[in-house]
Image (cartoon, helix red, strand yellow):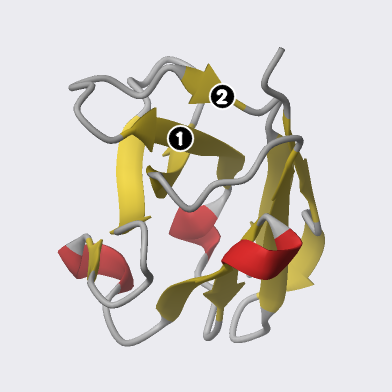
Amino acid sequence: QVQLVESGGGLAQAGGSLTLSCRASIRIGGYTMAWFRQTPGSERESVATINPSGGTSYSIDSVKGRFTISRDNTKRTVYLQMNNLEPEDTAVYYCAGQRLGVGLYGYWGQGTPVTVSS
């Protein structure tokens, strides 16, 4: 059973920073990893993705220049460094894994809440 466990969420003030971590129960070298977020009444949206080697990453426009996704495959961990937080970043953040060759994110963490106060 593949498990992804997020940590690092919490309360921050606007302009502040948080670092989310996602530790996997398996080796993730063959997985594209991503961070998603969801607010009540909204669909879950992809925030940032990173390829298996960590050499290529993508993030949505609203977080570019503020959020950075990274990974350490030796530690089976993916990170999301969030700087200059905005109240609009308030959401539950989820880590997800997509195995190479599979078109869906089949593995999800339980989510970690982030609340940004103005």
Q: Nearer the viewer, mark 1 or mark 2?
A: 1
Question: Residue 110 appears at what percent x and percent y?
Answer: 71, 24
Q: Residue at x 70, y 72 (%)?
A: 19
Question: Residue 8 appears at what percent x and percent y?
Answer: 81, 59
Q: Residue at x 68, y 55 (%)?
A: 76
Give the Cα distance between marks 1 and 2: 7 Å
Q: Secondary structure at mark 2?
A: strand
Quadrant that contains the N terminus: top right
Question: Residue 64 appears at what percent x and percent y?
Answer: 27, 77
Residue at image mark 2? 108
Quadrant that contains the C terminus: bottom right
Residue at image mark 1? 97
Badge 1: few (under 14), some or many (20 or more) residues near its Cα, within 10 Å?
many
Residue type at mark 1 is Gly
Badge 2: few (under 14), some or many (20 or more) residues near its Cα, within 10 Å?
many
Residue type at mark 2 is Trp
Question: Residue 3 appears at what percent x and percent y?
Answer: 72, 25
